[in-house]
Image (tube, rainbow, N blue to C red):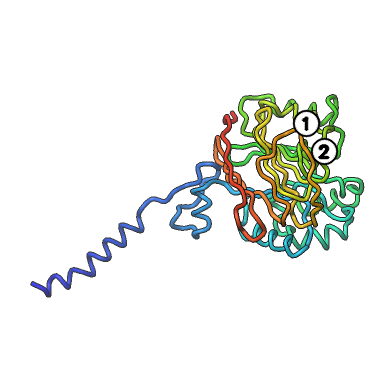
Amino acid sequence: MMAPIRALLPLVLFAALGLGACSPGGGDRGTTDAPPPAAARPPAERSHAVRGTTVWAVGDAYPTPGGRRLAARVRGERPRLLLYLGDVYETGTPSDFRERYEPLYGTLARRTLPTPGNHEWPRRATGYRPYWRAKLGRPQPDWQRRRIAGWEILQLNSEAPHAPGSAQVRWLRRAVDGPGTCRIAIWHRPRWSTGWHGDQADVAPLWRALRGRARLVLSGHDHDLQRFADRDGLRQYVVGAGGRPNVPLPRRSAARARFTSRSGAGGLRLRLRRGAATIEIVSAGGRVLDRSAVRCEPLR
């Protein structure tokens, strides 16, 4: 009886392997794209599908050792979108973009949504606008919006006029005039900050226009990492630790800081899904310094 059993073993193993290969794979429910079956994707992409669509946010990048390590980490994860929160040093000239920004994030340019900072905005005609037009193949508007993974990203501009009656605020009010709160707004100078520059009261019209219409606000400017308690239904993150040396001069803020780090380079990794997001503040070395989550009312 042993010989027939041995003869059947290869057939049993083959059938078991075949059944395993035919198991259905998971999909990314947070995106509108239909991904390939999980079995056809490498492990990193399978993890991406389970957790949501990956978006990184970084501001104030600079090619210090920490800034280079952070950029290599972001590039290595191949995020669906990079939100660049502004400032190309020193003054956003073509050579600054070529020598200081391009080596860090240039390969991600076609999947980048940038907002200008105070350093490059005065020379936007020769630096910021030509650089992004060449990379994206079209002029870069001063403000715009984009849908991804059930969320809407509102790229705003703290360096352009933003008074209550300005063209930007009028556009913003029209853009958010609809159901849902699954929106992320980005601009350079933060409304709330315990960093060197402190709270930026002049951007309050942007903040007010978002109340009850969005969930997250991301900014740079101060060279550190901060998370604030929810205020007016919005949660502010400061993500200006892209490599530029920090000035450790903490200030008081009218908003309540829940987390701060001024010790090194880092960025923000978001996993977006319809109606929810997880947000991680990550060091250049890959350590998760702070983890939080939000829920939002889906857009229609």
What is the secondary structure assignment of the residue under circle 2? loop
Furthest-bottom residue in this view = 3
Q: Nearer the viewer, residue 274 or 216?
A: 216
* 3 w.r.t. 171: above or below: below
Residue occupying the point 73% across, 58% down: 105
- Quadrant for the N terminus in the image: bottom left
Hey, what amino acid is under mark 2?
Ser
Question: Residue drawn 28% across and 61% down?
Answer: 16
Pointer 2 local density, CA inside 10 Å: few below 14, some 14–19, many at least 20: many
- 232 lies left or right of 130: left
**Mark 1, residues whose alpha carbon is within 10 Å: few (<14), some, or many (≥20)?**
many
The image quarter containing residue 142 is top right
Q: Earlier in the sequence, mark 1 or mark 2?
A: 2
267 or 146, which is in the foreground? 267
Residue found at the far left of this picture:
1
Percent from the top left, x then y, of residue 228?
68, 38
Q: Where residue 198 is drawn, which disc sits there?
A: none
What whole-number distance in Å separates the C-alpha atoms at marks 1 and 2? 9 Å
Could you say where residue 268 lies in the image, as x and y percent from the top left?
66, 49
Q: Secondary structure at mark 1?
A: helix
Q: Position of residue 173 (x, y in %)?
A: 74, 26
Q: Is 42 on the left or on the right of 212, as rendered?
A: left
Q: Are marks 1 and 2 in contact (CB under 8 Å)?
A: yes
With 19 as the anchor, is 97 left or right in this view?
A: right
Quadrant for the C terminus in the image: top right
Q: Residue tagged by mark 1?
A: 206
Residue type indicated by callout 1: Leu
Relative to 54, is 20 above or below? below
The residue identified by callout 2 is 158
